[in-house]
Image (cartoon, rainbow, N blue to C red):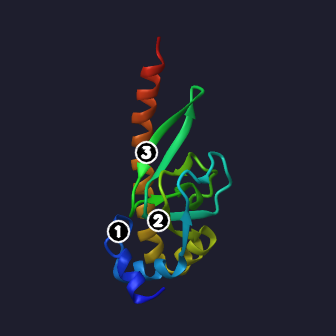
C-alpha cells in the first residue's frame, strides 16, 4: 500500500485506537474491494472467512425476524463489517451495499496469524472486535424490540 493510501486510513474510526505500528501492520494485510449498489456482500448464515473495514459508502445489516426483514444497522465509512469471521462463526446478518461501497478486506486466517505472531497487535485487534460485538448486540436488541412491538396486533 502506498504512503498516500495509508494516510487515508488514519482518520477512520476503526483504526483510531490502534498504535501507529499496529495500524500500519493491519493495513499491509488488507486488499481493497468494491461492491456495487444493492450488491449482497454476504448472506446470513454464510461461512465467514473475510473481515472488512468500510472505506466509503453505506452498508445495511439485515436479519429475518418473525418472517420479515429487519434492518439492524447501517454502517458507514470507517466502521468494521463481518466480526463473525474473526470469531470463526457463520454470518449473523445479511450485508448489502446501499450505494457503491469500497472496503478493505482481510482474510481472517492472515489476521489470526498476525495476532499470534504479535500478542500486542492481537490484543489491540481483539479489543476492537469485542467493542464491535457489544455495539452490534445493542443495536440488534433495539431493532428486535421495535420489530416485535410493530408485529403485535
Q: Which mark is residue 73?
A: 3
Name, please, the residue furthest toward the top. 153
Q: Residue at x 46, y 41 (%)?
A: 72
Q: Kindly report the distance in space between the C-alpha atoms of the residues bearing marks 3 and 2.
A: 15 Å
Q: CA distance from mark 1 to mark 2?
A: 9 Å
Q: Nearer the viewer, residue 103 or 124?
A: 103
Look at mark 1 in the image and give the residue it sits on.
12
SS label for mark 1? loop
Tell me, for residue 53, which label it has, or none. Answer: 2
User: What percent of the width, then of the height, locates residue 119?
Assistant: 48, 76
Task: Answer above or below: position of 137 versus 20.
Answer: above
Q: Residues within 10 Å of mark 1 (few under 14, many from 20)?
A: some
At which x and y percent is residue 126? 46, 64
Mark 2 Cα-neighbour bin, 10 Å: few <14, some 14–19, many ≥20: many
The Cα atoms of the two marked residues, 3 and 1, are separated by 18 Å
In this view, the residue in front, 134 or 51, is: 51
Asked if the residue at tag 2 contacts the one at tag 1, i.e. Cβ–Cβ closer than 8 Å, the answer is yes
Q: Secondary structure at mark 2?
A: strand
Amino acid at each position: 500500500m502506498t504512503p498516500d493510501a495509508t494516510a487515508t486510513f488514519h482518520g477512520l474510526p476503526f483504526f483510531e485506537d490502534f498504535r501507529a505500528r499496529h495500524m500500519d501492520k493491519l493495513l499491509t494485510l488488507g486488499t481493497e474491494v468494491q461492491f456495487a449498489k444493492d450488491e449482497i456482500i454476504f448472506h446470513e448464515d454464510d461461512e465467514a472467512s473475510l473481515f472488512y473495514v468500510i472505506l466509503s459508502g453505506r452498508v445495511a445489516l439485515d436479519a429475518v425476524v418473525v418472517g420479515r426483514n429487519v434492518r439492524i444497522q447501517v454502517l458507514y465509512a470507517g466502521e468494521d463489517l463481518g466480526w463473525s469471521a474473526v470469531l470463526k462463526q457463520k454470518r449473523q446478518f445479511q450485508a448489502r451495499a446501499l450505494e457503491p461501497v469500497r472496503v478493505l478486506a482481510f482474510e481472517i486466517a492472515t489476521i489470526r496469524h498476525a495476532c499470534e505472531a504479535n500478542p500486542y497487535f492481537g490484543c489491540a485487534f481483539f479489543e476492537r472486535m469485542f467493542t464491535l460485538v457489544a455495539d452490534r448486540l445493542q443495536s440488534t436488541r433495539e431493532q428486535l424490540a421495535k420489530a416485535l412491538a410493530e408485529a403485535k396486533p
